[in-house]
Amino acid sequence: MTSETFTNRYLVAGNYAPLQEETSTSALPVTGELPRELNGRYLRIGPNPRGDVDPATHHWFNGAGMVHGIRLRDGRAEWYRSRFVESERGAPNTNVLSHAGRILTLIEAGRPPVEISPDLDRMAVWDCDGALSRGFTAHPKVDPATGDLYAITYNPRHSSLRYVVLGADGAARHSSDIDVDDGPMVHDMALTETRVVVLDLPVTLAAARRLAQSGGPLTRLPLTWDDDHPARIGILPIGGTAAQVRWIEAPRCFVFHVLNAFDNADGSLTMDVIRYDRMFVRDVWGPSDSEPTLVRWTVNTARGSVNEEVISEYRVEFPRVDPALTGRAHRYGWFAGFSAHGLMITDDVERDPADGFGTGPLVRVDTRTGDTTVHDYGPGRVTMEPAFVPRPDAVCEDDGWILSVVHDAHADRAELVVLDAADLGAAPVARVHLPHRVPFGFHGNWIDDDELA
Ligand SMILES: [Fe+2]
Protein backbone atom coordinates (compact mmCIF):
# COMPACT_ATOMS: atom_id res chain seq x y z
CA MET A 1 0.00 0.00 0.00
CA THR A 2 1.41 3.41 -0.92
CA SER A 3 0.63 6.93 0.17
CA GLU A 4 -0.95 7.56 -3.28
CA THR A 5 -3.71 5.03 -2.62
CA PHE A 6 -3.95 5.09 1.17
CA THR A 7 -5.73 7.63 3.37
CA ASN A 8 -4.51 7.52 6.94
CA ARG A 9 -7.71 8.14 8.92
CA TYR A 10 -5.79 9.08 12.06
CA LEU A 11 -4.45 12.21 10.36
CA VAL A 12 -7.55 13.42 8.51
CA ALA A 13 -10.74 11.76 9.74
CA GLY A 14 -13.08 13.98 11.77
CA ASN A 15 -12.10 14.09 15.41
CA TYR A 16 -8.97 12.01 14.96
CA ALA A 17 -7.27 14.88 13.19
CA PRO A 18 -4.71 16.66 15.38
CA LEU A 19 -5.10 20.26 16.60
CA GLN A 20 -2.52 22.77 15.41
CA GLU A 21 -2.50 25.27 18.29
CA GLU A 22 -2.51 25.50 22.06
CA THR A 23 -5.39 27.45 23.60
CA SER A 24 -6.35 28.96 26.98
CA THR A 25 -9.89 29.93 27.96
CA SER A 26 -11.18 31.21 31.31
CA ALA A 27 -14.61 31.07 32.99
CA LEU A 28 -16.14 28.28 30.95
CA PRO A 29 -19.94 28.17 30.55
CA VAL A 30 -21.62 25.35 32.50
CA THR A 31 -25.02 23.74 31.99
CA GLY A 32 -26.31 22.27 35.26
CA GLU A 33 -24.47 22.53 38.55
CA LEU A 34 -20.90 21.41 39.14
CA PRO A 35 -20.52 19.54 42.44
CA ARG A 36 -18.67 21.83 44.85
CA GLU A 37 -16.72 18.82 46.10
CA LEU A 38 -14.88 18.65 42.77
CA ASN A 39 -11.83 20.84 43.39
CA GLY A 40 -9.01 19.91 41.07
CA ARG A 41 -8.28 19.23 37.43
CA TYR A 42 -9.62 16.82 34.87
CA LEU A 43 -6.70 16.06 32.55
CA ARG A 44 -6.63 13.95 29.43
CA ILE A 45 -4.04 13.23 26.77
CA GLY A 46 -3.75 11.84 23.28
CA PRO A 47 -1.40 11.84 20.31
CA ASN A 48 -1.34 15.13 18.43
CA PRO A 49 1.44 15.00 15.83
CA ARG A 50 2.81 18.34 14.61
CA GLY A 51 4.51 19.19 11.35
CA ASP A 52 5.10 16.83 8.45
CA VAL A 53 3.95 13.30 9.18
CA ASP A 54 4.11 10.61 6.48
CA PRO A 55 0.55 9.25 6.13
CA ALA A 56 1.90 6.01 4.70
CA THR A 57 3.61 5.10 7.95
CA HIS A 58 1.84 7.14 10.65
CA HIS A 59 0.36 5.03 13.46
CA TRP A 60 -2.34 6.36 15.82
CA PHE A 61 -0.18 5.41 18.80
CA ASN A 62 2.65 7.70 17.64
CA GLY A 63 3.08 11.45 17.79
CA ALA A 64 3.84 13.84 20.63
CA GLY A 65 1.01 14.19 23.09
CA MET A 66 -1.32 17.09 23.75
CA VAL A 67 -2.71 17.53 27.26
CA HIS A 68 -6.18 19.00 27.75
CA GLY A 69 -6.97 20.34 31.22
CA ILE A 70 -10.17 21.62 32.80
CA ARG A 71 -9.82 23.33 36.19
CA LEU A 72 -12.83 23.02 38.52
CA ARG A 73 -13.12 24.89 41.83
CA ASP A 74 -16.02 25.80 44.15
CA GLY A 75 -18.63 24.86 41.57
CA ARG A 76 -17.00 26.82 38.75
CA ALA A 77 -15.06 25.77 35.65
CA GLU A 78 -12.16 28.21 35.94
CA TRP A 79 -10.22 27.34 32.81
CA TYR A 80 -9.53 25.05 29.89
CA ARG A 81 -5.99 24.77 28.57
CA SER A 82 -4.42 22.62 25.86
CA ARG A 83 -0.66 22.17 25.75
CA PHE A 84 1.72 20.19 23.58
CA VAL A 85 3.87 17.92 25.72
CA GLU A 86 7.45 19.02 25.18
CA SER A 87 10.41 16.68 25.59
CA GLU A 88 13.71 16.09 23.83
CA ARG A 89 13.43 12.41 24.71
CA GLY A 90 10.10 11.67 23.01
CA ALA A 91 6.95 13.31 24.31
CA PRO A 92 4.44 11.09 26.15
CA ASN A 93 0.95 10.79 24.65
CA THR A 94 -0.86 7.99 26.48
CA ASN A 95 -1.79 8.76 30.07
CA VAL A 96 -1.64 11.58 32.61
CA LEU A 97 -1.96 11.04 36.35
CA SER A 98 -0.54 12.17 39.67
CA HIS A 99 1.92 10.39 41.90
CA ALA A 100 3.74 11.74 44.95
CA GLY A 101 2.40 15.22 44.30
CA ARG A 102 3.61 15.36 40.70
CA ILE A 103 1.48 15.45 37.54
CA LEU A 104 3.10 12.97 35.13
CA THR A 105 2.44 12.36 31.44
CA LEU A 106 3.23 8.77 30.49
CA ILE A 107 4.03 6.53 27.54
CA GLU A 108 5.43 3.02 27.22
CA ALA A 109 8.36 1.53 25.29
CA GLY A 110 11.42 3.39 26.40
CA ARG A 111 10.53 6.97 27.31
CA PRO A 112 10.49 8.44 30.82
CA PRO A 113 7.57 10.48 32.17
CA VAL A 114 7.34 14.22 31.58
CA GLU A 115 6.17 16.18 34.64
CA ILE A 116 3.73 19.04 34.06
CA SER A 117 3.07 21.90 36.49
CA PRO A 118 -0.49 22.27 37.85
CA ASP A 119 -1.10 25.26 35.54
CA LEU A 120 0.14 23.06 32.60
CA ASP A 121 2.73 25.67 31.60
CA ARG A 122 6.01 24.07 32.73
CA MET A 123 7.33 20.66 31.70
CA ALA A 124 10.42 18.61 32.45
CA VAL A 125 11.50 14.99 32.12
CA TRP A 126 11.16 13.17 35.44
CA ASP A 127 12.98 9.82 35.57
CA CYS A 128 12.96 9.31 39.36
CA ASP A 129 16.70 9.97 39.76
CA GLY A 130 17.53 7.56 36.95
CA ALA A 131 15.29 4.69 38.10
CA LEU A 132 13.12 5.18 35.01
CA SER A 133 15.98 5.80 32.58
CA ARG A 134 14.90 2.73 30.56
CA GLY A 135 11.45 4.22 30.21
CA PHE A 136 8.13 3.65 31.90
CA THR A 137 4.57 2.56 31.17
CA ALA A 138 1.25 4.33 30.59
CA HIS A 139 -0.56 2.02 33.04
CA PRO A 140 1.07 1.76 36.44
CA LYS A 141 -1.16 0.63 39.30
CA VAL A 142 -1.38 2.30 42.69
CA ASP A 143 -2.11 0.21 45.80
CA PRO A 144 -4.78 2.26 47.63
CA ALA A 145 -3.61 0.98 51.03
CA THR A 146 0.00 2.13 50.71
CA GLY A 147 0.08 4.61 47.83
CA ASP A 148 2.94 2.59 46.31
CA LEU A 149 2.99 2.52 42.51
CA TYR A 150 3.69 -0.68 40.52
CA ALA A 151 4.76 -0.84 36.87
CA ILE A 152 5.83 -3.34 34.23
CA THR A 153 7.96 -1.56 31.63
CA TYR A 154 9.55 -2.56 28.33
CA ASN A 155 12.07 -0.97 26.02
CA PRO A 156 12.75 -2.03 22.41
CA ARG A 157 16.50 -1.83 23.08
CA HIS A 158 16.36 -4.43 25.85
CA SER A 159 15.16 -8.03 25.70
CA SER A 160 13.76 -8.11 29.24
CA LEU A 161 10.82 -6.42 30.92
CA ARG A 162 11.50 -4.40 34.04
CA TYR A 163 9.30 -4.58 37.15
CA VAL A 164 9.51 -1.28 39.02
CA VAL A 165 8.00 -0.15 42.32
CA LEU A 166 7.92 3.52 43.35
CA GLY A 167 7.00 4.45 46.91
CA ALA A 168 4.19 6.82 47.82
CA ASP A 169 6.95 9.39 48.40
CA GLY A 170 8.04 9.10 44.75
CA ALA A 171 11.32 7.31 45.51
CA ALA A 172 12.28 4.09 43.70
CA ARG A 173 11.82 1.09 45.99
CA HIS A 174 12.38 -2.01 43.93
CA SER A 175 13.36 -3.19 40.45
CA SER A 176 13.74 -6.60 38.82
CA ASP A 177 14.31 -7.59 35.17
CA ILE A 178 12.06 -10.32 33.77
CA ASP A 179 13.25 -12.30 30.75
CA VAL A 180 10.83 -12.67 27.85
CA ASP A 181 11.12 -13.70 24.20
CA ASP A 182 10.33 -11.71 21.03
CA GLY A 183 9.79 -8.28 22.65
CA PRO A 184 6.09 -8.39 23.60
CA MET A 185 3.95 -5.24 23.77
CA VAL A 186 3.05 -4.90 27.46
CA HIS A 187 0.52 -2.07 27.66
CA ASP A 188 -1.06 -2.79 31.05
CA MET A 189 -0.68 -5.06 34.09
CA ALA A 190 -2.75 -6.31 37.00
CA LEU A 191 -2.25 -5.79 40.74
CA THR A 192 -3.87 -7.56 43.69
CA GLU A 193 -3.21 -7.06 47.42
CA THR A 194 -0.40 -9.63 47.24
CA ARG A 195 0.52 -10.22 43.59
CA VAL A 196 1.48 -8.60 40.32
CA VAL A 197 0.43 -10.04 36.94
CA VAL A 198 2.54 -9.60 33.79
CA LEU A 199 0.80 -9.84 30.39
CA ASP A 200 3.02 -11.57 27.79
CA LEU A 201 0.75 -11.83 24.74
CA PRO A 202 1.27 -12.34 20.98
CA VAL A 203 1.86 -8.78 19.72
CA THR A 204 5.64 -8.42 19.43
CA LEU A 205 8.55 -6.47 18.07
CA ALA A 206 9.98 -9.69 16.54
CA ALA A 207 6.86 -10.20 14.42
CA ALA A 208 7.07 -6.62 13.16
CA ARG A 209 10.72 -7.16 12.21
CA ARG A 210 9.77 -10.28 10.24
CA LEU A 211 6.98 -8.34 8.50
CA ALA A 212 9.49 -5.63 7.55
CA GLN A 213 11.88 -8.21 6.09
CA SER A 214 9.07 -9.72 4.01
CA GLY A 215 8.02 -6.34 2.59
CA GLY A 216 4.70 -6.14 4.45
CA PRO A 217 2.93 -2.89 5.37
CA LEU A 218 4.94 -0.95 7.92
CA THR A 219 4.15 1.79 10.38
CA ARG A 220 6.21 3.72 12.88
CA LEU A 221 4.79 1.42 15.57
CA PRO A 222 7.04 -1.64 15.25
CA LEU A 223 4.57 -4.11 16.78
CA THR A 224 2.33 -6.66 15.05
CA TRP A 225 0.47 -9.90 15.79
CA ASP A 226 2.85 -12.83 16.31
CA ASP A 227 1.63 -16.31 15.31
CA ASP A 228 4.73 -17.85 16.86
CA HIS A 229 4.58 -16.20 20.30
CA PRO A 230 2.82 -18.07 23.13
CA ALA A 231 0.16 -16.25 25.19
CA ARG A 232 0.94 -16.36 28.89
CA ILE A 233 0.67 -14.43 32.12
CA GLY A 234 3.38 -14.17 34.76
CA ILE A 235 2.47 -13.95 38.44
CA LEU A 236 4.88 -12.77 41.10
CA PRO A 237 4.62 -11.71 44.72
CA ILE A 238 4.16 -7.98 45.12
CA GLY A 239 7.72 -7.52 46.43
CA GLY A 240 9.16 -10.39 44.41
CA THR A 241 11.87 -10.74 41.82
CA ALA A 242 12.07 -12.25 38.33
CA ALA A 243 13.15 -15.60 39.80
CA GLN A 244 9.74 -15.89 41.47
CA VAL A 245 7.61 -15.35 38.35
CA ARG A 246 5.20 -18.21 37.76
CA TRP A 247 4.22 -18.41 34.07
CA ILE A 248 0.78 -19.74 33.14
CA GLU A 249 -0.64 -20.27 29.65
CA ALA A 250 -3.33 -17.67 28.87
CA PRO A 251 -6.16 -17.56 26.30
CA ARG A 252 -4.69 -16.71 22.88
CA CYS A 253 -5.64 -13.06 22.49
CA PHE A 254 -4.39 -9.53 23.01
CA VAL A 255 -5.25 -7.25 25.95
CA PHE A 256 -4.57 -3.54 26.06
CA HIS A 257 -6.43 -2.87 29.32
CA VAL A 258 -7.18 -4.50 32.65
CA LEU A 259 -10.26 -3.33 34.59
CA ASN A 260 -9.05 -4.71 37.94
CA ALA A 261 -7.80 -7.84 39.70
CA PHE A 262 -8.06 -9.36 43.18
CA ASP A 263 -7.06 -12.36 45.29
CA ASN A 264 -9.59 -15.03 46.21
CA ALA A 265 -9.72 -16.93 49.50
CA ASP A 266 -8.86 -20.24 47.79
CA GLY A 267 -5.58 -18.83 46.48
CA SER A 268 -6.86 -18.20 42.97
CA LEU A 269 -6.79 -14.75 41.40
CA THR A 270 -9.48 -12.95 39.43
CA MET A 271 -8.72 -10.43 36.69
CA ASP A 272 -11.20 -8.65 34.42
CA VAL A 273 -9.72 -7.67 31.06
CA ILE A 274 -10.75 -6.37 27.65
CA ARG A 275 -9.93 -9.18 25.26
CA TYR A 276 -9.29 -9.00 21.50
CA ASP A 277 -9.13 -12.26 19.51
CA ARG A 278 -6.40 -10.69 17.37
CA MET A 279 -4.70 -7.30 16.97
CA PHE A 280 -2.54 -5.67 14.29
CA VAL A 281 -3.07 -8.48 11.76
CA ARG A 282 -5.02 -7.00 8.83
CA ASP A 283 -4.91 -3.43 10.13
CA VAL A 284 -1.51 -2.36 11.40
CA TRP A 285 -2.36 1.38 11.53
CA GLY A 286 -4.65 1.18 14.54
CA PRO A 287 -6.63 -1.11 16.81
CA SER A 288 -9.49 -2.58 14.76
CA ASP A 289 -8.86 -6.23 13.92
CA SER A 290 -11.41 -7.68 16.34
CA GLU A 291 -14.11 -6.61 18.80
CA PRO A 292 -13.27 -5.72 22.42
CA THR A 293 -14.91 -8.11 24.87
CA LEU A 294 -15.03 -7.82 28.67
CA VAL A 295 -14.00 -11.17 30.13
CA ARG A 296 -13.13 -12.51 33.58
CA TRP A 297 -10.03 -14.65 33.95
CA THR A 298 -9.95 -16.86 37.03
CA VAL A 299 -6.36 -17.93 37.47
CA ASN A 300 -5.80 -21.16 39.38
CA THR A 301 -2.19 -20.76 40.39
CA ALA A 302 -2.02 -24.24 41.94
CA ARG A 303 -3.06 -25.96 38.71
CA GLY A 304 -1.53 -23.36 36.44
CA SER A 305 -4.73 -22.75 34.49
CA VAL A 306 -6.86 -19.81 33.39
CA ASN A 307 -10.65 -20.07 33.09
CA GLU A 308 -12.29 -17.43 30.88
CA GLU A 309 -15.89 -16.24 31.09
CA VAL A 310 -17.55 -13.44 29.12
CA ILE A 311 -18.95 -10.88 31.59
CA SER A 312 -20.90 -8.75 29.11
CA GLU A 313 -21.58 -8.99 25.39
CA TYR A 314 -21.68 -5.19 25.18
CA ARG A 315 -18.59 -3.93 23.36
CA VAL A 316 -16.56 -1.78 25.73
CA GLU A 317 -13.07 -0.32 26.11
CA PHE A 318 -11.21 2.09 28.39
CA PRO A 319 -12.21 0.19 31.57
CA ARG A 320 -12.22 2.05 34.89
CA VAL A 321 -12.86 0.97 38.45
CA ASP A 322 -13.18 2.93 41.69
CA PRO A 323 -9.49 3.70 42.37
CA ALA A 324 -10.06 2.86 46.08
CA LEU A 325 -10.70 -0.73 44.97
CA THR A 326 -7.60 -1.28 42.85
CA GLY A 327 -6.43 -4.81 43.70
CA ARG A 328 -9.58 -5.47 45.77
CA ALA A 329 -12.84 -7.22 44.86
CA HIS A 330 -14.96 -4.84 42.82
CA ARG A 331 -18.50 -4.99 41.55
CA TYR A 332 -18.76 -2.24 38.95
CA GLY A 333 -16.72 -1.28 35.94
CA TRP A 334 -17.23 1.89 33.91
CA PHE A 335 -16.35 1.97 30.21
CA ALA A 336 -16.63 3.81 26.93
CA GLY A 337 -19.06 1.67 24.93
CA PHE A 338 -19.61 1.17 21.24
CA SER A 339 -23.09 1.70 19.83
CA ALA A 340 -25.14 2.76 16.85
CA HIS A 341 -24.60 6.34 18.00
CA GLY A 342 -20.85 5.91 17.67
CA LEU A 343 -19.27 7.89 14.93
CA MET A 344 -17.19 5.19 13.35
CA ILE A 345 -18.93 1.85 13.80
CA THR A 346 -22.37 0.40 14.39
CA ASP A 347 -23.48 -2.72 16.19
CA ASP A 348 -25.24 -4.24 13.21
CA VAL A 349 -22.75 -3.65 10.43
CA GLU A 350 -19.69 -5.80 10.05
CA ARG A 351 -16.69 -3.68 10.92
CA ASP A 352 -14.42 -2.61 8.18
CA PRO A 353 -10.88 -2.03 9.43
CA ALA A 354 -10.94 1.31 7.60
CA ASP A 355 -13.64 2.49 10.02
CA GLY A 356 -11.24 2.58 12.93
CA PHE A 357 -12.11 2.96 16.56
CA GLY A 358 -15.21 4.77 17.75
CA THR A 359 -17.12 4.88 20.99
CA GLY A 360 -20.59 6.06 21.97
CA PRO A 361 -22.28 5.87 25.37
CA LEU A 362 -20.99 5.52 28.91
CA VAL A 363 -21.47 1.92 30.02
CA ARG A 364 -21.58 0.49 33.53
CA VAL A 365 -21.24 -3.27 33.93
CA ASP A 366 -22.12 -5.09 37.15
CA THR A 367 -19.44 -7.78 37.01
CA ARG A 368 -21.36 -9.98 39.49
CA THR A 369 -24.50 -10.21 37.37
CA GLY A 370 -23.39 -9.08 33.92
CA ASP A 371 -26.09 -6.38 34.00
CA THR A 372 -25.20 -3.52 31.70
CA THR A 373 -26.47 0.05 32.18
CA VAL A 374 -25.95 2.76 29.61
CA HIS A 375 -25.94 6.56 29.57
CA ASP A 376 -26.46 7.72 26.01
CA TYR A 377 -25.12 11.24 25.43
CA GLY A 378 -27.34 11.71 22.37
CA PRO A 379 -27.00 11.51 18.58
CA GLY A 380 -23.51 12.25 17.36
CA ARG A 381 -22.22 12.57 20.92
CA VAL A 382 -19.57 10.07 22.00
CA THR A 383 -17.64 9.70 25.18
CA MET A 384 -13.94 9.18 25.57
CA GLU A 385 -12.51 7.28 28.55
CA PRO A 386 -14.54 7.86 31.73
CA ALA A 387 -13.12 8.40 35.20
CA PHE A 388 -14.98 7.42 38.36
CA VAL A 389 -14.53 9.98 41.16
CA PRO A 390 -15.81 8.80 44.57
CA ARG A 391 -17.86 11.29 46.55
CA PRO A 392 -16.03 12.30 49.75
CA ASP A 393 -17.21 9.87 52.47
CA ALA A 394 -18.81 7.63 49.83
CA VAL A 395 -21.10 5.01 51.34
CA CYS A 396 -21.11 2.48 48.49
CA GLU A 397 -19.15 1.53 45.38
CA ASP A 398 -21.08 3.68 42.90
CA ASP A 399 -21.41 6.72 45.20
CA GLY A 400 -19.64 9.31 43.09
CA TRP A 401 -19.43 10.90 39.69
CA ILE A 402 -18.42 9.89 36.20
CA LEU A 403 -16.32 12.52 34.43
CA SER A 404 -15.51 12.27 30.75
CA VAL A 405 -14.87 14.39 27.71
CA VAL A 406 -17.73 13.98 25.23
CA HIS A 407 -17.31 14.84 21.56
CA ASP A 408 -20.29 16.40 19.79
CA ALA A 409 -19.87 15.70 16.09
CA HIS A 410 -22.65 18.09 15.04
CA ALA A 411 -21.19 21.06 16.90
CA ASP A 412 -17.60 19.83 16.36
CA ARG A 413 -17.00 20.76 20.00
CA ALA A 414 -16.27 18.96 23.24
CA GLU A 415 -17.75 19.08 26.73
CA LEU A 416 -16.62 17.77 30.08
CA VAL A 417 -19.73 15.91 31.25
CA VAL A 418 -20.37 14.98 34.88
CA LEU A 419 -22.82 12.13 35.59
CA ASP A 420 -24.17 10.77 38.87
CA ALA A 421 -22.56 7.31 38.82
CA ALA A 422 -25.46 5.76 40.77
CA ASP A 423 -28.13 7.19 38.46
CA LEU A 424 -27.00 6.84 34.86
CA GLY A 425 -30.58 7.25 33.61
CA ALA A 426 -30.64 10.85 34.84
CA ALA A 427 -29.60 13.90 32.85
CA PRO A 428 -25.99 14.96 33.40
CA VAL A 429 -25.25 16.73 36.69
CA ALA A 430 -23.19 19.27 34.75
CA ARG A 431 -21.79 19.93 31.29
CA VAL A 432 -18.74 22.17 30.94
CA HIS A 433 -18.62 23.65 27.45
CA LEU A 434 -15.08 23.61 26.03
CA PRO A 435 -14.03 26.15 23.39
CA HIS A 436 -13.27 23.57 20.69
CA ARG A 437 -13.07 19.86 20.01
CA VAL A 438 -10.72 17.49 21.84
CA PRO A 439 -9.32 14.86 19.44
CA PHE A 440 -9.96 11.20 20.19
CA GLY A 441 -7.02 10.06 22.26
CA PHE A 442 -6.26 7.72 25.07
CA HIS A 443 -6.54 8.30 28.80
CA GLY A 444 -7.62 10.87 31.36
CA ASN A 445 -7.88 11.27 35.12
CA TRP A 446 -9.36 13.51 37.77
CA ILE A 447 -6.57 14.95 39.92
CA ASP A 448 -7.93 16.36 43.15
CA ASP A 449 -6.21 19.40 44.67
CA ASP A 450 -5.47 17.22 47.73
CA GLU A 451 -3.18 15.04 45.56
CA LEU A 452 -0.97 18.04 44.77
CA ALA A 453 -0.86 19.50 48.28
FE1 LIG B 1 -4.04 2.39 27.45
Image (cartoon, rainbow, N blue to C red):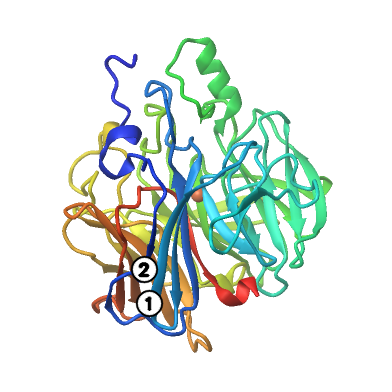
| Pointer 1 or 2: first along the chain | 2
What is the crowding at mark 1: few (fewer than 14 residues within 10 Å), some, or many (at least 20)?
many
Secondary structure beneath label 2? strand
Give the image quarter of residue 69: bottom left
Residue behind mark 1: 421
Measuring from the top left, give residue 415's x and y in whole percent. Answer: 30, 63
Measuring from the top left, give residue 302's x and y in whole percent. Answer: 70, 56
On screen, residue 289 above or below 340: above
- Looking at the image, do the residues carrying marks 1 and 2 touch, with CB atoms under 8 Å apart? yes
Q: Amino acid at mark 2?
A: Arg
Q: Is residue 373 left or right of residue 410?
A: right
Q: Is residue 40 left or right of residue 148?
A: left
Residue depicted at x 65% and y 28%: 182
Of residues 424 and 57, the one drawn nearer to the viewer in this rendering: 57
Measuring from the top left, give residue 408's x and y in whole percent. Answer: 23, 56
Measuring from the top left, give residue 166's x and y in whole percent. Answer: 75, 59
